[in-house]
C-alpha cells in the first residue's frame, strides 16, 4: 500500500511540474505576441499609420489551445488608406515582401 501512495505522490509531482512548464511556455508565447505587437506598432508609426485598436486578442489569450494572436483591430477608412499607401510604397520590394509574408505564414502554421 505504501508503494501505491508513493506512486500517487510522484504522479502528482510530475503533473505539477508539467503544469508549471506549460504556464512558463504560455507566458513566453504571450510575451512574444506582445513584442510582435510592439514591433508592428513601431513600424506603422514610422510610416505614419496608427491602428487605434491594435492589441492582443483576448480570446486567444484566454484559450488553452489557440496561440496568442495580435489583433489588428478596426480603423477608419482614412487609416485603412494610409496603411494601403504605406504598403504600396514598399512596392519595389513587393515581391520580396510577399515571399517573406508567405514564409512567416508557413512557419506559423507548422508550429506545434
Image (spheres, rainbow, N blue to C red):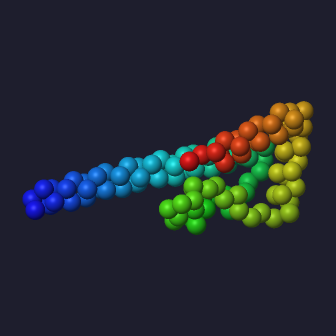
**Nearer-the-camera pick, 111 or 24:** 111
* Residue 15 x, y percent position in the rendering: 31, 56
* 37 lies left or right of 2: right
* 81 lies left or right of 63: right
- The image shows a total of numbered marks equal to 0
Instruction: Please give the name of the residue rendered at 66% of the width and 59% of the height, measured from the top-left corner.
Output: 71
Instruction: Please give the name of the residue rendered at 21% of the width and 60% of the height, measured from the top-left corner.
Output: 8
In the displayed structure, would residue 74 be above or below residue 19? Answer: below
Q: Is residue 46 visible?
A: no
* Residue 20 x, y percent position in the rendering: 35, 53
Q: Is residue 111 visible?
A: yes
* 54 lies left or right of 100: left
* Residue 74 x, y percent position in the rendering: 74, 64
**Nearer-the-camera pick, 6 or 20:** 6
**Nearer-the-camera pick, 107 or 36:** 107
* Residue 95 x, y percent position in the rendering: 87, 35
Instruction: Please give the name of the residue rendered at 76% of the width and 37% of the height, measured from the top-left corner.
Output: 100
Query: If the image is split into quadrants, where does the N terminus sit?
Result: bottom left
Q: Looking at the rendering, which quadrant does residue 2 occupy?
A: bottom left
**Nearer-the-camera pick, 15 or 102:** 15
In the displayed structure, would residue 49 be above or below residue 78? Answer: above
* 67 lies left or right of 24: right
Q: Residue furthest left?
A: 2
Amino acid at each position: 500500500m505504501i508503494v501505491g501512495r508513493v506512486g500517487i505522490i510522484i504522479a502528482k509531482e510530475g503533473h505539477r511540474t508539467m503544469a508549471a512548464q506549460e504556464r512558463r511556455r504560455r507566458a513566453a508565447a504571450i510575451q512574444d505576441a506582445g513584442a510582435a505587437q510592439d514591433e508592428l506598432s513601431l513600424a506603422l508609426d514610422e510610416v505614419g499609420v496608427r491602428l487605434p485598436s491594435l492589441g492582443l486578442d483576448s480570446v486567444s489569450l484566454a484559450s488553452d489551445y489557440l496561440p496568442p494572436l495580435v489583433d489588428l483591430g478596426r480603423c477608419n477608412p482614412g487609416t485603412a488608406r494610409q496603411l494601403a499607401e504605406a504598403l504600396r510604397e514598399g512596392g519595389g520590394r513587393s515581391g520580396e515582401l510577399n515571399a517573406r509574408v508567405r514564409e512567416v505564414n508557413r512557419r506559423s502554421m507548422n508550429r506545434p
